[in-house]
Image: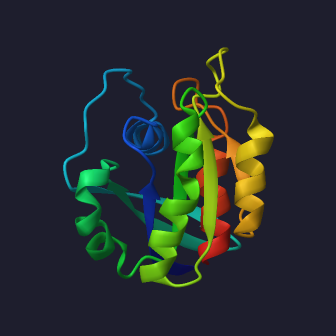
Amino acid sequence: MSKLMRKICLLGDGAVGKTSLIRRYVFDIFNDEYIMTIGTKVSKKSMELDGKELTLMIWDILGQKEHTSLHSAYYKGAVGAIVVCDFTNKKSMENLSRWVDDFRGVAGDVPVVIAVNKQDIENKAYLFEEAKKIAEGYDAPAIPTSAKSGKNVELLFKMIGERVI
């Protein structure tokens, strides 16, 4: 079985659940305590896809806008990204385009998957279709996720894995 390693970035506004999605995927744990990511944190996990062993190097990148000058350095060498917004925060959905544009401005026209997180929360600030429409503009799929319940988290990482092979 051939082995591949790919760098992907997790992007999005602060507090949308990027770190929680990674923790759910890599360690199968959830903690609803918010801890701001400082700089970037790299996690890795392997999966089997199309008869290949794919190891994703997952870069969890801080979402605070005041640190955007650091972002481009973190994007270099990435072959894909998961861009995360949060069902409870309409502004995070409206900022999806900025995240994708900034990322692709450095990484090139690489695959992107949009994760609309916190799907488990009942009082949503917008409809999934709104985020899906933005994703379609980038030829990217969108998927509702919940780091808390684990809903669609494995599928999310499988989707980006299939696109970066």
Look at 65% across and 32% down and name the residue there: 151
Kindly tell me whether residue 155 is visible in this rendering: yes
Q: In this image, 111 relative to 59: left or right?
A: right
Q: Which residue: 44% across, 55% down?
A: 11
| Residue 136 percent across, percent down from the top left | 77, 62
Left or right of 27 in this view: 39: left
107 to 151, vertically: above or below: below
Who's the residue at 63% across and 21% down the image?
120
Image height of 4 relative to 46, above or below: below
What residue is at 63 percent from the left and 59 percent from the top? 113
Q: Position of residue 48 (x, y in %)?
A: 61, 64
Depth check, front residue: 27 or 107: 107
**162 sits left or right of 9 in the view:** right
**x and y percentages locating residue 25 in the rendered image:** 49, 43
Q: Is residue 141 visible?
A: no
Q: Which of the two residues, 32 or 27, is positioned nearer the viewer here?
A: 32
Of residues 148 and 51, the one drawn nearer to the viewer in this rendering: 148
Report x, y in % for residue 12.
45, 50
Q: Would residue 38 be found to the left or right of residue 84 on screen?
A: left
The quadrant in which residue 60 appears is bottom left
Find the residue positioned furthest to the top.
122
